[in-house]
Image (cartoon, grey):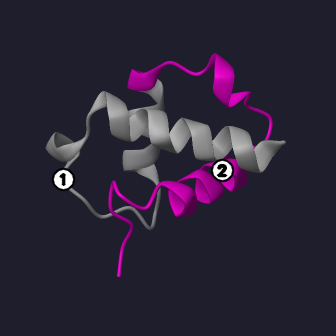
């Protein structure tokens, strides 16, 4: 089963693996969205994404990176 937009923590963990040298605080939402969509395990409709979802992913990424 693939990741959905609501799987913020799992998405963040995959992004940390894919982009270990990136500071999530410096990432713009359009780039973040593209990276999420490009994840191998991601399987959801890009149209279901919004700013609140991207913010949740970014916050999880920042929490896990610290």
Report the residue at 24% width, 59% height from top: 44
9 with respect to 51 (left or right): right
Residue 61 position within the rendered picture, expressed as x and y whole percent measured from the top left: 65, 44
Q: Is residue 38 above or below residue 4?
A: above
Q: Position of residue 10 (x, y in %)?
A: 55, 63
Residue at 66% x, 30% y is 24
Sort mark 2 into few (<14), some (14-19) or many (20+) by Cα contacts within 10 Å: few
Q: Would you say 17 lies left or right of 44 here?
A: right
Magenta part of the chain = 1-30
Determine which residue is flagged by label 2.
18
Residue 29: in magenta span:
yes
Q: Position of residue 64 (x, y in %)?
A: 74, 50
Looking at the image, tell me whether mark 1 or mark 2 is earlier in sequence order. Answer: 2
The residue sitting at 15% across, 41% down in the picture is 47
Label 2 SS: helix
Give the quarter of the figure containing the N terminus.
Answer: bottom left
Q: Mark 1, residues whose alpha carbon is within 10 Å: few (<14), some, or many (≥20)?
A: few
Mark number displayed over residue 45: 1
Count of numbered circles in the view: 2
CA gap, disc 1 and disc 2: 21 Å
- Mark identifier at residue 11: none
Q: Is residue 10 left or right of residue 51?
A: right
- SS under mark 1: loop
In this view, 1 is above or below 4: below
């Amino acid at each position: 089963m693939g990741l959905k937009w609501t799987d913020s923590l799992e998405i963040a963990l995959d992004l940390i693996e894919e982009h270990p040298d990136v500071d999530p605080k410096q990432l713009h939402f359009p780039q973040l969205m593209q990276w999420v969509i490009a994840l191998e395990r991601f399987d959801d409709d890009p149209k279901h994404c919004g700013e609140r979802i991207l913010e949740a992913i970014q916050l999880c990424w920042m929490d896990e990176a610290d």
